[in-house]
Image: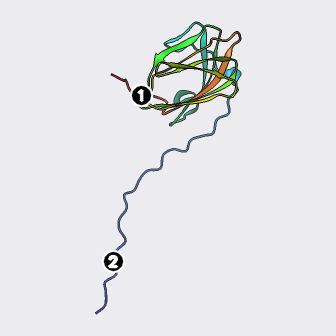
Amino acid sequence: MKAKASKPAKTASRAKPAPRKAVIREVAEAMWEEPPAHLGGAFSKMLVRPETAGSRLMDYRISVYQPRAYVAPHAHAIQEQVYHVLDGEGLMEIDGKRQVVRKDSVIFIPPGVEHAIYNTGVTDLRFIVVTTPPEDEEID
């Protein structure tokens, strides 16, 4: 008895998303911003975000905190963050415990962990922050 050839399964046709373009930005092109809850001279340049570069999955910024500047303790519902200290020194607070961070310190913050960073040094604290996804949900 001859077996019947099976028909190939139909696949749902999916429209391809529009191709995205690579972006090169000069840091000097971006304006300094002082985001909410960033206090005392805590400035950031939003270099790669959905609105600045068309990114879908990340927020990449450089931050400079003047002496005494800080971001208030907070937590993110779904976002992960990596801080990479480039210059200066200060304190990273994670769940109420503070630890010195300085040039070449790398900090990973998972969702739900309360954190803050303070410039307790005598020079500017300069660092990169990478956050994914770029937008968060509210924590109750």
Q: Quadrant of residue 102?
A: top right
Whole-percent x and y of residue 74? 45, 19
| Label 2 CA crowd tier, 10 Å (few <14, some 14–19, many 20+) | few
Q: Earlier in the sequence, mark 2 or mark 1?
A: 2
Residue holding disc 2? 6
Secondary structure of the residue carrying numbered label 1:
loop
Q: Amino acid at mark 1?
A: Gly
Distance Cα–Cα, label 2 vs label 1: 50 Å
Residue at the left extreme?
1
| Label 1 CA crowd tier, 10 Å (few <14, some 14–19, many 20+) | some
Q: Is residue 16 left or right of residue 127?
A: left
Whole-percent x and y of residue 122? 70, 9
Residue at the bottom extreme?
1
Q: Which mark is residue 32?
A: none
**In the image, what residue occupies the spot 48% across and 33% down?**
133
Q: Quadrant of residue 86?
A: top right
Question: Is residue 69 depicted above or below 134 in this figure?
Answer: above
Number of dots carrying numbers? 2
Quadrant location of the C terminus in the rendered image = top left
**In the image, what residue occupies the spot 65% across and 28% down?**
105
Q: Amino acid at mark 2?
A: Ser
Q: Which mark is residue 112?
A: 1
Secondary structure of the residue carrying numbered label 2:
loop
Q: Nearer the viewer, residue 125 or 56?
A: 125
Question: Is residue 100 depicted above or below 120 in this figure?
Answer: below
**In the image, what residue occupies the spot 59% across and 12% down?**
42
